[in-house]
Structures are given as structure tokens and as C-alpha cells.
Image (cartoon, grey):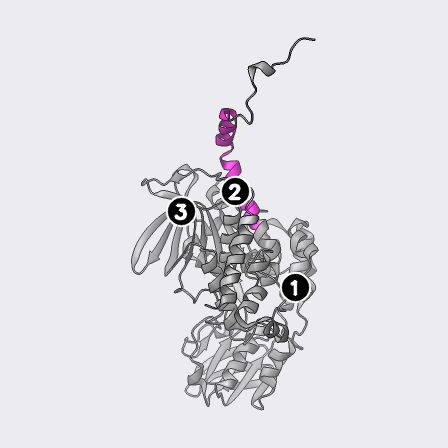
Amino acid sequence: MSSALIALEAQVRADLTKTAHPDATWLQARTGVDGKAALDVLIVGAGQGGLATAFGLLRSRVTNILVLDKATEGQEGPWLSYARMPTLRSPKSYTGPDLDTPSLTYQSWHEARFGRDHWQQLDLIPRDLWAEYLRWFRRVLELPVRNGCEVSEITPAADGLLAVTLQNEGRTETLYTRKVVLATGQEGLGEWTIPEPLRHLPSSLCVHPAQPIDFARLRGKQVAVIGAGASAFDNAATALEAGAADVHLFCRRADIQVIQPYRWLTFRGFLRHFCDLDDAWRWRFMRAILEMREGFPQATYDRCARHANFHLHEGAPIEAARETSDGVKLQTPHGTFTADFVICGTGIDMDFAGRPELRHCAGNIATWADRYRPPEDERSPRLGRYPYLGDDYALMERNTGATPWIGDIHIFAIASTMSFGPSGSSINAMTTAVPKLVHGLTRGLFRADIETYWTSFKDYDVPQAVVAKSAARREP
């Protein structure tokens, strides 16, 4: 480790010590039904959202926490798996999980790692360096993370606790906790989508971007990419760079989306107070933003367009698809195309019932369609399936009283977008979103124990001064 990085880590520790007030322990230990110690907060997902949440809780003196991730250490999040862009698309000046601690910013780490001049010359942050920074962030803060653990079930337990069942190397284990945060990124409460006309195709011919793709096997092949967002272009470019014979990208719209709405909304007013708007304004904004999809920068387009064998088809939705001996026949309004392999970069959809950890409450999770009826010209069944969350990111009941325990499950992922705007998986929103989530978690923990705090206050009898008898007030 370089001397600069050693010095930076010392600075991190000094900064956190200086800003530790108040540092009093304030939560009392709980136990589960089997006498096992219960956590205060269990965070599912050790990507950037989960790590930032853990850091925020530790700063609030909520120390009895644990972060779980199904990936092996160092492979959390999308950065070294299905994220296929060379750099982050956010400007390098955006801060994220550091939560406004200067010594914890990516810039501070980069300068310690490569020097200040290198930072000045840097355009965008390389994806692999961002992943390395997150590993450093986790280590220097000593965040409690367990890898190789996948949550399979969440159920209510006695004394207001949640029982969380997880699988760990073939073993089943149950943890008890007061609150759960699902910081599960793009998957969130749903699944990656494959358009209906292609869903019958086998995975050997058609996949979504989060599935493992052996791009080397696409060399010399005809590849079709469905969708025209940033992820679709990333996958098209990766196939081209791997030597695909031709890559055809099909966009259902007449014109590809080049405006990036997330650049517009990156100001503190929107990020901090969007969730305070009424349902009509929240719906109006997020419908417009999410239906625009994510735009892409010039470099993303150029990465594809520099290849003569890249073909963009606008206004070309897939109307039908069938498997043949020659590959997959794709029917569009402009004719039929044959592909050896299809990648569907068409985003995600909400599917509570498809999440095994939520099977005991999926049918009673309130959605936006349950709580808000937009004007006719603003309706969207897809967005109506998003969960309608409380002001602490908690799930809410469709039918009150049927599953009250879901109020202790908090969603910090793509699924929180309709209620909070960019939040769980968005770097540009972390500086406002994480404190809001942590505030909601600590508020709930405090309120649940208010009787205990009242008793503690009444029993408090520590004097701040000793008054001598001789100093008693005398009569004039």
C-alpha cells in the first residue's frame, strides 16, 4: 500500500472521530425466539447502496447491523459482471457513498492511488476502478459484510422481529432482525424483462444483459440486440468488439433516446424533496423520466457506430420471433431478420410474486396502481406495478392489518424510484437518499422503544454538579 493511501486512511479515521457526536450507544439488545441475538438492521445487498446505508447507520450509532450479499467478495454489484461500459457515465465530480465525508470520496482515493495530476486529466471514472474503490470503502470502514449468503424467506417473528432465512454454501440459517433493507440494485422487487414475443426462446438463443454471456462465442455470429438504452448499446458494443459478424440493434421508437433526464434532475431540490411532492406530481415526473428511458452519451454511441457491421433499426419493435434451424427469425415492421443470438436490453419490471423472499407478503404489497389513479393520458400499467412506499422507504400494505410486519422491510433499490426518484442504485442521489433512508430507520427504531426511553429518562439521576451545604442560599 502506498504511503499516500496509508495517509488517506488515517485521515478517514480522524475525520470520523471528529464528527462522531453524539457517540452514545442508544439501542438495546434484542433476542429471537431461539435465544439468538437479534440484529437491529439487516441489509441485503453489499453493492454501493448497501455499503452506503451501512456507513450511514454506523454514523448514527446503529452498530448492531449486518450486510449480506450472494456474490463472492469483490464481485458485488454489476461492475465486474453485467456492467459492460468502460467507464461510469456519471461525471467524476459526483459524490456517492462517502456521504459528504471528503476523505472518503472517490476523488480522494483516486488521488492517493494515482496522484493529483492523474485525477485532473481523468475524464470519466473507469468501471473497474470504481469497483476497486468500493472494496477499499468497505475495508477502511470495517463494514460488517458476509458474502455467499442469499436470502430465501422473510417472515414475522415474535416481539416485533423479522425472521430472515438465508442459504449459505448449502446450509440454511435463520437470522432475527428488527428491520430489513433490501438494497438489491436493479433486480429490486422484480425481474429483468424479455419482450413477450421472445419469451418462449431458450436461454441458449435469447438472454437479458444480467445473465452470463460468453461474448467470445459470438465471434463471426449474427447478433440482435433489443432495446436502445445505454445497456443495450453497451452489449451491442461488447459483441462487436468480440468479433461478431453483424450486430443489429432494434429500437421500437421512431427515434433513439439521446436525452439523459437524470442529468437534469441532479440538483438538491429535486433529489431531496421529490418524495415530499403529492402523488400527482411524483407520478407525472417519474412517468416522463422512466418512459424516456436512460439516454446515453456520445462515447457510448460511437463505441458501436465506429464498426461498419453495426446496424441501427429505429421504429422496429419485435412483432414475432421463432426458432429455426438457421437461428432466430425476428419479425419487425421493416421485414424479417435472422440472428444467431439475441440480447434483450429492455429493462426490468416489478414482479413481487417472483421474489422468493417476499412470497409471504407479495399479494399484500401496495402498488402505485392501488394508491393513485392518474389522468387517462398519463396512465402506465408498468409503472403502476411499482411499490408505493412509505416516507421511510418501507413497504405498505394493500389491505391494512393483513401483513403489518412488512412495514419493517425497507426498499432501497430500483423499485423505490416511483416513490423517491433516483435513490438506491443511483450514484448521483446517494448524498441525499441515504441520509433520508437512515433517518427513517432510526426514527422507527426509536419510536418502537419509546416506553423504554421514557423509563430510562425518569430513572436518570446523574448529577452534573455538587452543591456544598455551606453554599445554601441564606435569608436576607
Residue 307 figure quarter: bottom right
Task: Specify whether residue 65 is painted magenta.
Answer: no
Q: Secondary structure at mark 3?
A: strand
Residue 121 figure quarter: bottom right
On the image, numbered disc 2 is attached to which residue? Answer: 23
- Total labels: the figure holds 3
Closer to viewer: mark 2 or mark 3: 2
- CB within 8 Å, label 1 to label 3: no
Q: Mark 1 or 3 closer to N-term? A: 3
Give the magenta range. Answer: 437-462
- The quadrant of the picture occupied by the N terminus is bottom left
**Residue 37: where, in percent of width, then height?**
36, 42
Farthest top residue in view: 475
Q: Is residue 358 above or below residue 125?
A: above
On the image, numbered disc 3 is attached to which residue? Answer: 155
Mark 1–mark 3 Cα distance, whole angstroms, equals: 35 Å
Mark 2–mark 3 Cα distance, whole angstroms, equals: 33 Å
Residue drawn at x 50%, y 49% is: 58
Question: Relative to 193, is 473 on the left or the right?
Answer: right
**Residue 418: where, in percent of width, then height?**
60, 56
The one nearer the camera, 276 or 387, is 276
Q: Mark 2 or 3 closer to N-term? A: 2
- The quadrant of the picture occupied by the C terminus is top right
Q: The disc labelled 2 sits on which kind of residue?
A: Asp
The one nearer the camera, 341 or 26, is 26
